[in-house]
Amino acid sequence: AQCPSLVSTVLAPACSSSGAPLPLLQETVLTSTPCKLQVQVFAPPSCCAFVVARLLALGVEPASIVLPGGCPMRVTPLSLTPIPGPTSVPSLSTLELALPATPTTIGLSVRAQAAIVRFDISVMKTFVDTTETHQLKFGP
């Protein structure tokens, strides 16, 4: 068996309610044994809004859930996974998820979006910034 290919399409734009630059989301299939889906989230620097947590939402259905600060979560999460990473910014965080080899994954389509939880010490308030929403399609 071999690892699947991946095509990622942007479904919705990123959002920043904290005033920080927009966070970035990138997915790659690692052709290791076993196959893995590598997800990277970049949280750009911000003056006073420290990164408290990063979460990856995976699902198949769209959503429009308003998060603290006003940014939308556009995935109905079947899985909500913490992404480990430093609280200092800028920071690149990586998460690797086991991925079945082909032919199991051929035709599989999943929505992905990451949320960056920030606490702004200047206003003592929590904000949640969101990455673009991606449609991930796995092929041969």
Image (cartoon, grey):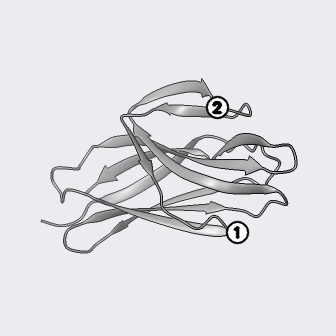
User: Mark 1 vs mark 2: which is more N-terminal?
Assistant: 2
The three-letter code of the residue at mark 2 reads Leu
Tell me which residue sits at (24%, 66%) in the image: 35
Say if 10 sits above or below 32 in the image: above
Indicate the quadrant where residue 7 lies.
bottom left
Q: Position of residue 70 (x, y in %)?
A: 73, 30
Instruction: Left or right? Give the position of 32 relative to 52.
Output: left
Tell me which residue sits at (57%, 52%) in the image: 53
The three-letter code of the residue at mark 1 reads Pro
Tell me which residue sits at (68%, 68%) in the image: 88
Judging by the rendered image, the residue that carries numbered circle 1 is: 90
Secondary structure of residue under mark 1:
loop
Indicate the quadrant where residue 48 lies.
bottom right
Q: Position of residue 64 (x, y in %)?
A: 58, 24
Name the foreground residue: 5 vs 99. 99
Determine the CA span between mark 1 and mark 2: 22 Å
Name the foreground residue: 120 vs 15. 120
Judging by the rendered image, the residue that carries numbered circle 2 is: 67
